[in-house]
Every structure is written in structure tokens, then in C-alpha cells.
Image: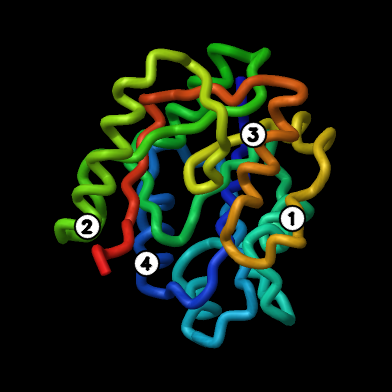
Amino acid sequence: MVKKISIIIPVFNRYVSLELTLESIFNSSYRDFEVIIVDDASTDERLSSLKETFDIKYIKLPNKMGPAAARNRGISTAQGEILFFTDSDVVLLKHTLDECVRFFSEYPERKCVMGIFLKEPINKGFGPEYKALWDWFVIENHKKNTVSELDTALCAIKREMIDKLPKFDENYNNANIEDNVYGYEIQKSCPIYLNTRMIFKHRFPGLF
């Protein structure tokens, strides 16, 4: 039975959306988790105040280094058996963590799983609603139980797997393809599985 989950969230200046992310996490029905916020040298000082509201580990990097470096710092701090990656513009449903635990308990030989986004985004507008619906449509019509790319907004990886992997490539100092490169390393050893019951909501960019 899977026990502790370490939830790792890199952030840069997204106080309002991160607060929503944390509210959703602490509203989860599954309770055996820790939350690690890695602040990529944000200029918004309000972010540090979140540790007064939520039981989180808050780490601030001295210089802006990018999400790859932030995730690596989170990994080095994490104590859980499962490392659960998400972003500061994502909201978990009440049973998202339960589904993560259920998946690894039901398939103990599997090491990495990705969830899906709901077809309704967090924010309103034609652009976000179209993008959310399109992403949902693509996954809904995906006939395999594995995927070819990793999305660190909605994935979980066993610690035993991560300990065998190289770090996220910090040469990508912006949100770019660092998670795809990491996913390629994972797939050298095992598939990336898809769990359509592990559901998230996402804040998509506007049309312009």
C-alpha cells in the first residue's frame, strides 16, 4: 500500500492561482502527503505568507533558475514514496490523490502515471475553454493506456524510479521541453501510464 506522497510545485509570481492550488490539495480526501513549494526567486513577496496559512515546505531559490531546477530542489527535499508533480495553475479534485494511490496499489510494478485535465478549465473565455476541450478530446480518444510524453503538471513517479534517473535538465531555464526530456529518460526503463480517473483542472492562457 502506497503511503506518503510528496507534492512538488515550482512557482514564479503566481500567488492567487497557487493559493487555489493549495486549497484544492488540502481539501483532498487522501491526507498522507507533504507539499513542497519551490519559489523560483519570485518578486511577489506574498508567496512566502502562504506557509502561514498552509502546512507546506516553502523553499525560495536565490536566483531565477527555471522550473527544472525548482523540481530538482523539490526532489532533493521530498520524503514520500511517490513524487507527485503539479503546477501553480492547476487545481486537484477531491479524489485526485486517492486515484494516484489506487493506481500504484493496483499496479505495483508500474512506476510513472499521468492524469488528465477536465474539459472545463478553471478560467472562462473562448481560448481557455477551447484548449481544455481539445486536450480532453485528444485524451478521450486515446486508445492506449500509455502516453509518449510526460507532463509535469499532472504526473506522479515512484521514488524508486526517480532515484535511478538523471536530474531534470537545468539547461532549460524556462518552461520549455524539460519535462519531455525527463519523460524520455523514464521511458528508457518503463512506460508512462495514463490514468483517466486521476483528474485535474487547469488554468489555460487566454486567446491573446
How many residues crowd around disc 4 within 10 Å: few (fewer than 14), some, or many (20 or more)? some
Amino acid type, mark 2:
Gly
Q: Which residue is mark 1?
A: 72
Where does the image place residue 150, in percent across and percent down from the top left?
Answer: 57, 37
N-terminal-most mark, 3 or 4: 4
Would you name the residue on which mark 2 appears? 127
Q: Quickly name the residue at label 3.
A: 157
| Cα–Cα span, label 4 and label 2 | 18 Å
Q: How many marks?
A: 4
Contact (CB < 8 A) between labels 3 and 4? no
Dot 2 falls on a residue whose secondary structure is helix
204 or 4, nearer to the observer: 204
Query: What amino acid type is highlighted by mark number 4?
Result: Ser
Q: Secondary structure at mark 4?
A: helix
- Residue at 39% x, 43% y is 28
Three-letter amino acid code at disc 3? Ile
Q: Is residue 205 above or below residue 60?
A: above
32 vs 171, nearest the viewer = 171
Q: Position of residue 79 (x, y in %)?
A: 73, 45
**Mark 4 or 1 closer to N-term?**
4
Q: Is residue 15 left or right of residue 178?
A: left
**Image depth: mark 2 or mark 3 in front:** 2
Picture coordinates of residue 54, whole percent (x, y): 48, 65
Residue identifier under label 4: 17
